[in-house]
Amino acid sequence: MADETDEKETHCQSCGDALLPGAIYCIGCGTPLLAPPEQHRPLFVDELGDDATTGRSTRGYFFDDPASPPPAQRKGRTAPILVMIVVLVLVAGVLGFIFGKDGAGPVQSEAEPEPSTSPTSEPSSVPSVDPNAPPEHQLLRISRLDTEAATKLIGTWIPQLAAVGAGDGGDADWHQALTRYQKIKTAHPEALLLDTGEWPSSYVKPGMYAVVVPHPSDTSTPALEWCVEQGLSKTDCAAKHLEVSGDPTDNFDAQ
């Protein structure tokens, strides 16, 4: 019995020729020597069910069957995901607005300029003086405001319009002195008020206020010519040499 089995394994069952070891077909007649592979169903065809009689699979969309219904869509998950995305976007936008890109505070728009905190400067012709203050205090305040502009006139000749102040050789009182200065200031807005006590080399008598016009020149002649051009008499306009040292007696010239 063993001899017959060995003979079947070494000889072809069809033609009887000897077989080579490990051969998968007979070299004499070409008969396959291995058993045919076991037939398996496709993995995506699990259950045919009732459609087995018609030859159609319940998953016919794999075979591009135009009559087959599309796969059922999953419901109940898309809407919550979209809602969650919208909520996250809104939260990120609010946090970005509050903390800014650097986390230091709200982001300020570049197109919106920052409000200026610097006070509006007043023109020199309208000094900031309390109109309710006593007249002598108002005149003192005005002279302090005009000091910087007057220092630029040192060493030059300028027209002088008047000397105001209460007392000997001045006005009857400080109210009259202030009224007189305001009248001159209205006619000549560029006029400056000088405290004679702070210019001892230019004025002999302290305690008065000189009203001058900032039209500087090297000699007294242009200053006196300006007086004539303005139609001012010698009692209303003269030339003053503004100095901070020396004898004040040589710093005056009349028409």
Image (spheres, grey):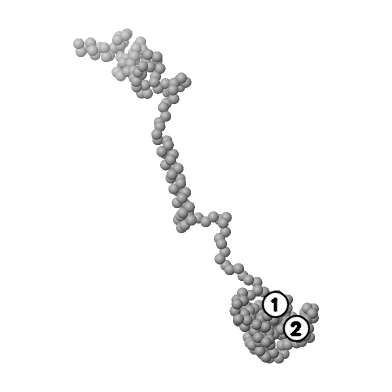
- Residue 112 in percent (x, y) is at 56, 56
* Quadrant of the drawing holding the N terminus: top left
Identify the amino acid type marked 2: Cys
Q: Nearer the viewer, residue 127 or 95?
A: 127
Identify the amino acid type marked 1: Lys
Question: Can residue 1 be seen here?
Answer: yes
Name the element at disc 1: helix
- Residue 123 in percent (x, y) is at 65, 72
**Residue located at (78% from left, 78% from top):** 230
Q: Which residue is mark 1?
A: 185
Q: Nearer the viewer, mark 2 or mark 1?
A: 1
- Residue 216 in percent (x, y) is at 72, 79
Marking on residue 237: 2
Question: Residue furthest toward the top?
Answer: 15
**Residue located at (32% from left, 8% from top):** 15
The quarter of the displayed image where residue 74 is located: top left
Name the element at disc 2: loop
Q: Nearer the viewer, residue 53 or 36?
A: 53
Dot placed on the residue nearer the N-terminal end, 2 or 1: 1
The quarter of the displayed image where residue 156 is located: bottom right
